[in-house]
Image (spheres, rainbow, N blue to C red):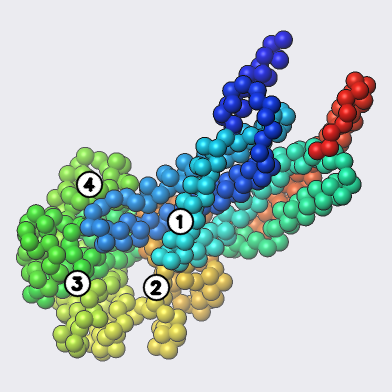
Amino acid sequence: MWKNTMISIAKTFLRGIYSCHWISDNTRPNRPCCWFSFLSFVSILALSWMYVCYIAFNDRTDVNDRAFENLKTWVNWYMIVMVISAVLATYCLLLLVFGLLHFVIGEPLNLHWLHKVFLFLGLLTVTMGTVGVCIKWKKEWKTVYMSFQATAPFLHLCAVVALTLISWLVFKSYHKAQPSACKVFIMMTFMFVSAAVFLCPLAICSPCITNNLPPKPSLVGHRGAPMLAPENTMMSFRKSLECGVVAFETDVQLSKDMKPFLMHDNKSFLRTTDVKKKFPGRDGDRHTNFTLQELQTLNAGEWFLRTDPLQSVSSLSEEDKREAENQTVPSLSELLLMAKKHNVSLIFDLKNENNSTGFHNSDSYYTTDTIKKSGISPDKIWWLPKEYRHNVRNISPGFKQVYNVVAEMNADGGSFLNMEYSSLSAHEISDLREKNVSVNLWVVNERWLFSLLWCSGASSVTTNACHIFKNMSKPDWHLEPNKYMGIWISADVISLLLMFGLFIWQRKRNRVSRRNREQRGVPLLNF
């Protein structure tokens, strides 16, 4: 009695959630299998989109910074997209589970119209997001492709588990199917899918499945340590020193009085300073309209506490927050003194070099002059700007020349690359390292990506998250090929044995059910 009551309550609950009918409804559902197939399709898409959003989280600042350039207002748009995607994926998967439970307990699959509307909205959301990535953020598909080198072995195991669980429903459908053609179709389809899942490790090629793990990449502080302090401030670079970085990465611009200072944004100072408050009416002015003295009156830290761009402010102490709030715009000379004192290298972008009218009027000239006056060892300067590279080499031959194009490096006889992390494959990185070429990859912020590049053999990575990577003594995962093969074969064998057991159990159960129906004189229904 108690068991029947619980089953009845469970049926009522599932019926209410899925079809919004809290009492039994004998009305024949309208195309239940079509709607369940649509639900399954949207669930797979929503889960895939959530995966893309998770992988692209490494580059979330690209979205927020680009939005700020257009809207002039800071909003963490990427986090909004993440929350919407997570809610959509959770909703679809829960609805799919309820649908499967309906099938198990024999309830009609009568999906409510409101769920249908939400599913169409979910499909529209995923489609718009995918189109947006294809149009505005194409490079992120390379990151998604790269991610499979890190996640494929685990996705394979998840697929094996899911296939084993679903096999119970497949075998139930197989034994209930009456025409032989239906039985053949169900079993052939399932066998094809199973073979693809079981054998997919043959196509998995991950640098983390290796017998020889390369040394850990060195760390380069991207604008210092922007998760611990406002970017491109002296506090940020000091924090990166605590992470053990081998180099500072920054952005250099020239003030009105031709003094190099540190600032990433070159169209406006609105994002990272209080220029609107300090210089009313001049908030749209560019760097050439401000002297260094004027720039250093700007507050370059309050925005960091207010906007929390990398969701890290809550981890700071009160003392660090007070220090961050009072940061100013530093000059290049200040950073050079710090680099010289701590024997750290320096790499930078010249944000406005393309506007120069000749070497002696260029950012390269004034920056090189400032570097020479600082007295820092020339080999600590990783020179990246390419516009006046040969002029700079003539007056400062000790600078390490760094390139962002392999062909240019080879033509110039160089041996140092600085490229976006998705520009090189693991095989290309390995080949370059064998030729004694140093490879620095930017910007790497997530553990899975750092682990993957570690396994690939990168020399160093430019990162916002140096405080996270400094404590990593090994990649998040690394397996020897023989050990991975053992896990792969064991998982497949266990799954096959469980499937065989489920198949036999379903066949016996179906025979008992048929015998009982025949004894009661109940006609057998085709599935």
User: Which residue is at the front of the view, 78 or 416?
Assistant: 78
- The residue beneath circle 1 is 129
Q: Earlier in the sequence, mark 2 or mark 3?
A: 3
Q: Relative to residue 215, is residue 514 drawn left or right?
A: right
- The residue beneath circle 3 is 253
- The residue beneath circle 2 is 418
The amino acid beneath tag 1 is Gly
Q: Nearer the viewer, mark 2 or mark 3?
A: 3
Residue at (20, 83) in percent of width and height: 356
> Could you tell me if the residues under marks 4 and 3 are in contact, i.e. CB atoms within 8 Å?
no
| Quadrant location, the C terminus | top right
Q: Nearer the viewer, mark 1 or mark 3?
A: 1
User: In the image, is residue 388 above or below residue 468?
Assistant: below
Cα distance between the residues tagged 2 and 1: 30 Å
Q: Earlier in the sequence, mark 2 or mark 1?
A: 1
Q: Position of residue 392 (x, y in %)?
A: 25, 85
The amino acid beneath tag 3 is Gln
Q: Relative to residue 281, is residue 248 drawn left or right?
A: right
The amino acid beneath tag 4 is Leu
Q: Position of residue 315 (x, y in %)?
A: 31, 42
Q: Relative to residue 272, is residue 124 drawn left or right?
A: right
Q: Position of residue 469 (x, y in %)?
A: 41, 54
Q: Relative to residue 305, is residue 404 drawn left or right?
A: right
The amino acid beneath tag 2 is Asn
- The residue beneath circle 4 is 305
**SS assignment at label 1:** helix
User: Which residue is at the front of the view, 364 or 191?
Assistant: 191
**Residue with the most extreme top position:** 1
